[in-house]
Amino acid sequence: MASSFTSATSFLPKTLTTRRAPFRKIRSASALTVRSIFTGIVEEMGRVRHVGPTDAGGFELRIGASTVLGGVGLGDSISVNGTCLTVSRFDDSEFTVGLSPETLRRTSLSALAEGSPVNLERALQPTTRMGGHFVQGHVDCTGEIVSVDPEEDSLWVKVRVDAPDDAVHRAERVYYGGRDEPDRGRGL
């Protein structure tokens, strides 16, 4: 289903402003656990050093970086172009993350090549100053920018998405509030 929407609620199609997700009983408190939260503020620009298949049948992405490697550990989360990814290897100049086929389908990461710049941010810690807003880095789908219209010191961005129904429900919550986390390294 193709939906078209902007960050202003008056321009949202009816399906995004009136549909509600069905009530679901949460089976355990662990279902509410959020493992990583980001601010949406880019800490540094990294550079892709390698992206490709692994011998085990998966895919990996290796990124040159410096700032986000401060205090990093195996299993930590780093946001790469707005997508929450898990560190599987690192040294003092780069880190590696695994990419599932689902991640490649639902994000813009499949378009990366060696040398591509990427936006990077470490996950928040309880002692981190909160300079942006809470972003989980979970990606449901990609979209196509249809138009960008300036209005004073702001932009109205119209995005077309082909998304499953559950993503449309989540988009309602995101865009109704006027928040967005586009991949700022790819066009905006």
Image: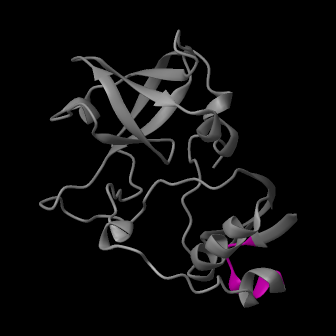
Residue 161 relative to residue 79: left or right: right
Q: Quarter-wise, where is residue 32 in the image?
A: bottom left
Q: Residue at x 84, y 67 (%)?
A: 3
Side of 14 where 117 appears, left or right: left
Q: Give the tally of numbered discs.
A: 0
Residue 12 in sight in this render: no
Taking depth in this image into account, of 56 and 3 the one nearest to the observer is 56
| Whether residue 21 is visible | yes
* Residue farthest left in this picture: 127
Q: Is residue 159 left or right of residue 89?
A: right
Asked if the magenta segment contains residue 11, the reply would be yes
Residue 100, quarter of picture: top right
Choose between 32 and 86: the one closer to the eye.
32
Residue found at x 75% / y 69%: 165
Q: Is residue 160 above or below residue 156?
A: above
Tell me how the rendering is colored: one colour
Picture coordinates of residue 44, whole percent (x, y): 36, 37
Query: Which residue lies at the image location 69% right of the left edge and 80% below the top edge?
Result: 8
Residue pictured at 44% horizontal, 78% vertical: 26
Residue 114 place in picture, x, y as percent: 56, 14
Q: Position of residue 18 (x, y in %)?
A: 74, 90
Q: Nearer the viewer, residue 119 or 21?
A: 21
Span of residues in magenta: 6-13
- The residue at the far top in this view is 55
Place of residue 70 in the rendered image (x, y in percent of width and height, measured from the top left): 18, 33
**Relative to 13, does residue 117 appear above or below in the rendering?**
above
129 in the magenta segment: no
- Whether residue 182 sits left or right of residue 162 in the image: it is left
Q: Is 43 situated above or below 54?
A: below
